[in-house]
Image: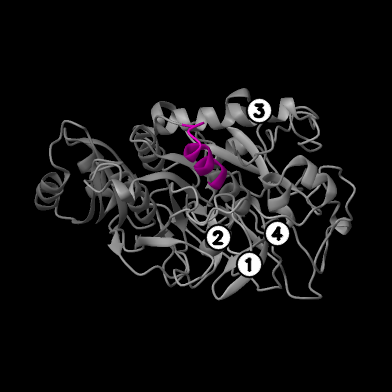
Amino acid sequence: MQKTFVATGWHRPRPGAASPPPDAARPRRFLAGAAALALAAGGGVAAAAPAAAASAQSYIVVLKDTAGDPGAVAAAHQGKFGFTASKVYRDAVSGYSGTMTAAQAGSLAADPSVDFVTLGRHFDKPLEPKAPNTEVAPFWWLRIGGSLEDAREGANQRASKDDGGSGVNVAVIDSGIDGSHPDLNVRGGVDCTSGEPVKVTPVDVMGHGTAVAGVIGARNNGAGIIGTAPGTPLWSVRVVSDQGSITEASLICAIDWVTSTRRDKDRNNDIDVANISIAGPGSNTPNCGKGTDPIHYAICRSVRAGVAYAVAAGNAASDVAGTIPAAYHEVVTATAMADFDGRPDGLAPSICGRDDWSAIGQRDDQPAFFSNYAVNIKDQRHTVAAPGVCILSTAPGGYSVNHGTSFASPAVAGAMAQCIKQKACRGSGADISEQFLDLAESYNKRHHDFGFAGDPLRPAGPKYYGYLTQIIRF
């Protein structure tokens, strides 16, 4: 059975509709509020053999670093084994995707130039957001972006004026971004749905990526909302097809393209932070996925190239160790907490517009009831929390309210961009992630009333949600 990955977000239901937990009614599938995206970023790459041995399917071929030019090797393999090679990867991965039978894949895996071959995975499309009214400073932003004094007073304050944003390039690997939205500084992007990065004018027919983008970088322009890194340059990396599917080849294409920006001659497009609001079943794999998981393998190499990754924990209310890419130790994994008033007092009514969260037990300043969490110490070390309930953000043509770890993750991605701008985070992707996590821990320990019930200072049993993210300003 092929494994399915989905976005980790949940959008507000129609007025009068029941309020089910994000993706809770979808066994084995979950949107990642940052994870709600239908990107098949889930389980181990080793999938079951095709039903018919002779039927051709998509495979990912990872070459040994000593194999030579991947394009030339792919052409040679195509001629030798008789299959169709498609996209060639050169940056995050040395390899290619191809359509072949299981028998051809088995023969190819024995070739001395090949490191490993895996059956390509598929993902489901994300849900579409709804458009409510807007507010100048949404509560989620005030909770982590305002001062503690503003938060205690519930002040509807804005960030210090910063139209230029952090100036740190952030990639949104998602359903695309509405490039015409006036509240977003979209510099460009590519469409990876074919497995090949095609330069396009960014669009988003599903809305999930645009909501993610707004949490990261909505402008501080006196209208709409404010992102965690207001006005920062955003790059749309689309991985969801018009039919709502996402292939493993499209995801690796996205990671490969993001990595390529660090290696080309144009320093203005260097991606510093990438957000992946997608999740699926799987686990951390030894040796960065070498031999087993090409997505993990690609992310590790991308991190070494200088890209820091923020990813959604997932919305299954379970141990994050069973969800990828959240379980990968090289990423910063975002869990979700709830804040209904922008204050750290935990006293606000449990409502969000027409959604009565009290009916399902969600309370102010506590972990989101749907959020995944860390248990083992290695997962705890790369886990941090951010607001993920009642998140007002941008949508194609307007604004929307969303719920899920899919929207906690971009809060972290934007905060990481601000950390880089302030030079509090620098170095490799791994260095930036570690410094960011250390700063979050230090800030929470110095400001005990900043966090929430369920953070490491007020633990919720074995469930570890991480310290609450804060937007760094000096």
Q: Identify the amino acid type marked 1.
A: Gly
Image quadrant where residue 301 sits: top left
Q: How is the image coloured?
A: one colour
Image quadrant where residue 221 sits: bottom right
Mark on residue 224? 1
User: In x, y percent, where is residue 5?
Assistant: 51, 53
The residue nearer to you, when weighing 150 against 139, is 150
Q: Earlier in the sequence, mark 4 or mark 2?
A: 4
Q: Residue 421 vs residue 153: left or right?
A: left
Label 3 belongs to which residue? 441
The residue nearer to you, when weighing 335 against 125, is 335
Measure how far apart labels 4 and 2 are at the Cα level: 12 Å
User: In x, y percent, where is residue 68?
Assistant: 12, 37
Mark on residue 219? 2
Measure how far apart labels 4 and 1 are at the Cα level: 8 Å
Mark on residue 425? none
Q: Residues within 10 Å of mark 1 (few under 14, many from 20)?
A: many
Is residue 423 found inside the magenta-colored segment of the image?
Answer: yes
Q: Earlier in the sequence, mark 4 or mark 3?
A: 4
Measure how far apart labels 3 and 2 are at the Cα level: 28 Å
Considering only vertical position in the picture, is 285 above or below 81?
above
Label 4 belongs to which residue? 137
| Residue drawn 62% across the image and 65% down it | 222
